[in-house]
Amino acid sequence: MQNVHRLAVPALIAILALSACAATPAPPLPDGGNVALGQKAYVDGPLVQPVEVVEDSRCPVGTQCVWAGRVRVKMLWLRGNGDRQPFEVTLGESTPLADGAIRLESVRPEKRGNGPIRPGDYRFSLRFMGGL
């Protein structure tokens, strides 16, 4: 009988520990207002993730350029069925996605003349237009 009690206590502790892990909610995902590379975010419906800055040819602040340049970002659409659909967005342009279009509204920080922006410093504002 003592063996049963000796086994019951560790089993009860293990069950309580596991149930505490299961009850801990995951932190909410951000919206599309301030998204870093590699970060998942809900953008007015779709779950997306920026994965790479393909091009950042913006004119540095304080200089005059013939062309303002552009920013292109490789993204993933993380679909509800587990599929990861790649797509690309360009600053200021709408890109068809799902039942609407997604738009890269802004890119931070501004480009400076003192060297390239580190990938971890980029932040993106995205907006989705469409849906039911």
Image (cartoon, rainbow, N blue to C red):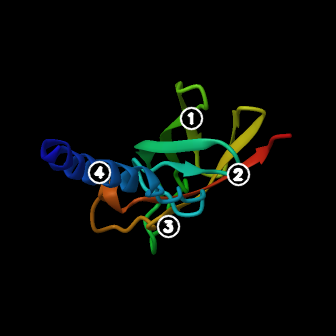
- For the residue pair 12 and 21, the one nearer the viewer reads as 12
Element carrying mark 2: loop
The CA span between labels 2 and 4 is: 43 Å
- For the question of whether residue 61 can be seen, the reply is yes
Q: Position of residue 13 (x, y in %)?
A: 26, 54
Q: What residue sits right under mark 1 in the picture?
A: 77
- For the residue pair 72 and 125, the one nearer the viewer reads as 125
Location of the C terminus by quadrant is top right
Which label sits on residue 44?
2
- For the residue pair 56 and 98, the one nearer the viewer reads as 98
Tag 3 or tag 2, which sits nearer the N-term? Answer: 2
Q: Could you tell me the amino acid type at mark 1?
A: Trp
Query: Is 105 placed left or right of 70 in the picture?
Result: right
Q: What residue sits right under mark 4 in the picture?
A: 12
The CA span between labels 4 and 3 is: 70 Å
In the picture, residue 1 is in which quadrant?
A: top left
Tag 4 or tag 2, which sits nearer the N-term? Answer: 4
Q: Position of residue 117 (x, y in %)?
A: 33, 59
> Which residue of the protein is positioned furthest toward the bottom in this rendering?
62
Q: Position of residue 70 (x, y in %)?
A: 53, 49
Tag 3 or tag 4, which sits nearer the N-term? Answer: 4
Does the CB distance between marks 2 and 3 fall below 8 Å? no
The CA span between labels 2 and 3 is: 36 Å
The CA span between labels 1 and 4 is: 42 Å
Element carrying mark 4: helix
Which residue corresponds to the image point at 55% horizontal and 42% vertical from the top-left? 48
